[in-house]
Image: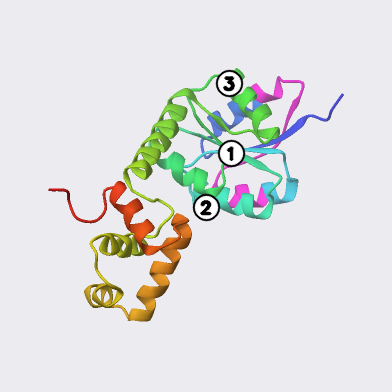
Amino acid sequence: MSAPIRVVVVDDHPLYREGVADALGDADDIDVVGTAADGQTGVAVVTDLRPDVVLMDLRMPGGGGVPATAAITARLPGTSVVVLTMSDDDSVFAALRAGARGYLLKESEGADIARAVRAAARSEAVFGPRIADRVLAFFASSRARAAAVPFPDLTDREREVLDLVAHGLPNAAIAARLFLSEKTVRNRVSDVLTKLHAASRAEAVALARDAGLGPTPA
C-alpha cells in the first residue's frame, strides 16, 4: 500500500480549518500533517513538513494566500497548492500565476476536496465547476483576441512596420514615420520576413494585404 498523501491546511478560520482537517482525516489515503492560520506561518509550516499538497485560503493575515503560494511553489516545486477560498472572482488568475495547481470554493463538499487533493498529488490541475467555467471562458476569449490580431507571432512594432510596408512605404519613409533609424527599420523588416517565412518583401506585402493590413480596398 502506498504512503498516504501528506496535506497541510492553511486557513485563518479555526472552525473551518479544523473541519477540513477532520474531514480529510477520515480518508485512509490522506494524512493531514499540519495546519496554519496565516500566510507567513503557512510558508514556514510547509517548508518544515514538506507535504504533498497544501490547501490554501486567500484572504488571510500575514500576507495572504497568493504570496504564500508563490513562496511555497518556488521553494518546493514538488508540493502542489490548491486554493480553497470564498473568493469567486478573478483571484483565480492571481493564484494560478503564483503557481497554484487548483482552485476550489469553500462551498465544496468534503468528498470533492478529497478528490482535489488526490488529483493535485498526481500533479493534475483541478478546479471547482464555477471556477472551471471562468477559466475556460478566459482562455476562449484570449484565443478569440489572438485570432483577431493578424500575425500574432509578430510584436506590435513589427506588425506596425509590416502595415507600412504593405502601404508601399520604403524603409526611409517608415523610419521617418516611426522616428526610427533606417538601420532599425531594415532589421525589423528582416525579422518580419523571417517570422512570416516570406522569401521577399513583395511576398510579405501580399501576405499582409491578405490579412487586412495595408491600404483599405476601394
Q: Residues within 10 Å of mark 2 (few under 14, many from 20)?
A: some
Q: Is residue 63 above or below residue 182?
A: above
Q: Is residue 205 above or below residue 50?
A: below
**Residue 207 spot, x, y in % from top left:** 35, 51
State the residue lying farthest toward the left. 218
**In the image, 143: left or right of 217?**
right
Mark drawn on residue 67: 2
Q: Is residue 46 magenta?
A: no
Gap between marks 3 and 2, in whole Å? Answer: 25 Å
Visible residue check, residue 86:
no
Q: Earlier in the sequence, mark 1 or mark 3?
A: 1
Q: Residues within 10 Å of mark 1 (few under 14, many from 20)?
A: many
Q: Is residue 44 magenta?
A: yes
Q: Residues within 10 Å of mark 3 (few under 14, many from 20)?
A: few
State the residue lying farthest toward the right. 1
- Closer to the camera: disc 1 or disc 2? 1
- Closer to the camera: disc 1 or disc 3? 1
Mark drawn on residue 112: 3
Task: Identify which amino acid the numbered label 3 is placed on.
Answer: Asp
Residue at x 28%, y 76% (from the top left corner):
175
Q: Is residue 19 above or below residue 99?
A: above
Judge by depth and name the residue closer to the eye, 96 or 198.
198
**In the image, 178: left or right of 127?**
left
Say how many tags the image has: 3
Visible residue check, residue 182:
yes
Q: Quadrant of the N terminus?
A: top right
Judge by depth and name the residue closer to the eye, 170 or 125.
170
Instruction: Give the residues drawn in magenta, as a range.
Output: 23-45
Task: Identify which amino acid the numbered label 2 is placed on.
Answer: Pro
Residue at x 61%, y 30% (from the top left corner):
18
Q: Secondary structure at mark 3?
A: helix
